[in-house]
Image (cartoon, rainbow, N blue to C red):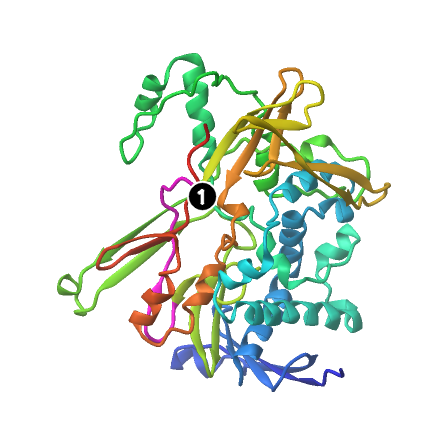
Amino acid sequence: MTIKPLLLALVACAALPPSVARAAPAPSQATMTVAGLQRPAQIRVDRWGLAHIYAQTDDDAFFVQGFNVARDRLFQLDLLRRKGLGHLSDAFGPTYVEQDRAARLFLYRGDMAQEWSSYGPTARRDVGRFVAGINAYIAWLDSHPQALPYEFDKLGYRPERWAPEDVLRIRTTGLSRNVKSEVARANVACKASLAVDAIRLRLQPAWTTTLPDGLDPCLPKDVLKVYELATQSPKLSASTQLAAIAPTLSAIDDDASAEGSNNWVIASQKSATGHAVLADDPHRAYNVPSLRYFVHLNSPGLDIIGAGEPTAPGIAIGHNRTSAFGLTIFNIDQEDLYVYRLRPDDNAAYWYQGKWEPLRSEHEQIAVRGAAPVTTELQFTRHGPVIYVDVEKHVAYALRSVWSQPGAAPYLGSLRYLRSNAFVQFKAALAHWERRRSTRSMQMSAEPSAGPPPA
């Protein structure tokens, strides 16, 4: 099939006071010929750098969003994708093999049909068009190499094409991280007791924890090393592209990120306008470029403005014509650390419900720049990836997380309600979550880790 290139108009605008506007330069305009557009579209960039995308179809709106975020943030996009999929070594050398292996352990490996359906009936199409836009910009660079971002020339590699599944399978950017608290609880129980830990951190709702018979609460020091590697940001340097790099580049970052969230609401009878006010305050680390990407999408079925992840279509924080929405992290149990007794003669099976169950193994090749590919073994239990094995004690540790369940791609759930035409539709779009608690002004929508706590 031949894809006919269509025009994409780029307009830089400036909204200035009349006294300044007379002396201001005229808005700049440019036109690009882009393969993959269904109809001509336009990007208008305002004085804050916010892109207002006007398209004649919803498909083109997401396509142009992908194209424009690649135009603005291609190095960030490529780095996030490589980090999430475990492809850092291919660009930066052998120092990153351990981090690549860690990332691959946490990729979504479940049923993809169920995964796609978790984000609504248009998700596959929306994500596909968004990714097609990213790839269209990468293809455009082939004939315009002078526009390749500086970082790629400096580090000596090229951006990779995306697949739609990449957006879904990468989980480690999600903030569902309570396993650290569980490990801290075990450490206190090891040195003192669970009663002492209740002073350190009160459980909500109130709950009295107990140690199962035979469970040693004293955990290995590095039990979360793989988990930390999978979730930390990659560290780069001017010599990153060389094979011999200091090992500290991929060492665990001990600095806790200043991240958290909160929201507040003012009732309509208490506000100056007579309308309710919802303030969303998600705390994320200060990064350059930002972890958020602001955009306005306007098409027959979309009129949304706000911020989202640069790697995902649409927005997660903002509003359409009828509903405003935000997101926050709140306390819900989404991770459990499982401890297994391994079969002593080979450590290849774990004791579960009265019998030995084989560990599931997958072997993957990690491409390494400047060196031969590395074949690595990834092990899984029925509950999740194995993150630590104590060979001498014949004990394995695995992480059960919502990341392994359908519907847990970070921030992608907003696709369900972006097209809502009334608040009742917006709330109905949230009803697919497993557990729900509502008040007049706030709805909590989250998915706890499935199944009972580990025994």
Residue 82 % position (x, y): 68, 51
Q: Which residue is mark 1?
A: 450
**In the image, what residue occupies the spot 32% across and 65% down?**
427
Residue 430 % position (x, y): 37, 61
Is 88 positioned to the left or the right of 274 in the image? right
Label 1: few (<14), some or many (≥20) within 10 Å?
Answer: some
Quick one: 411 or 41, which is closer to the camera? 411
**In the image, what residue occupies the spot 55% across and 73% down?**
62
Residue 292 % position (x, y): 50, 57
Is 210 positioned to the left or the right of 253 in the image? left
Quick one: 113 or 412, which is closer to the camera? 113
Reply above or below: 146 against 260: below
Prevalent SS, magenta region: loop
Which quadrant does the N terminus fall into?
bottom right
Q: Which residues are magenta?
A: 319-333
Which quadrant does the C terminus fall into?
top left
Residue 193 placement: quadrant? top left
Is 367 positioned to the left or the right of 361 in the image? right
Q: Is residue 296 magenta?
A: no
SS for callout 1? loop
Say if residue 361 shows up in the picture: yes
Residue 392 % position (x, y): 66, 15
Say if residue 12 shows up in the picture: no
**In the image, what residue occupies the spot 41% across and 49% down?**
447
Q: Amino acid at mark 1?
A: Ala
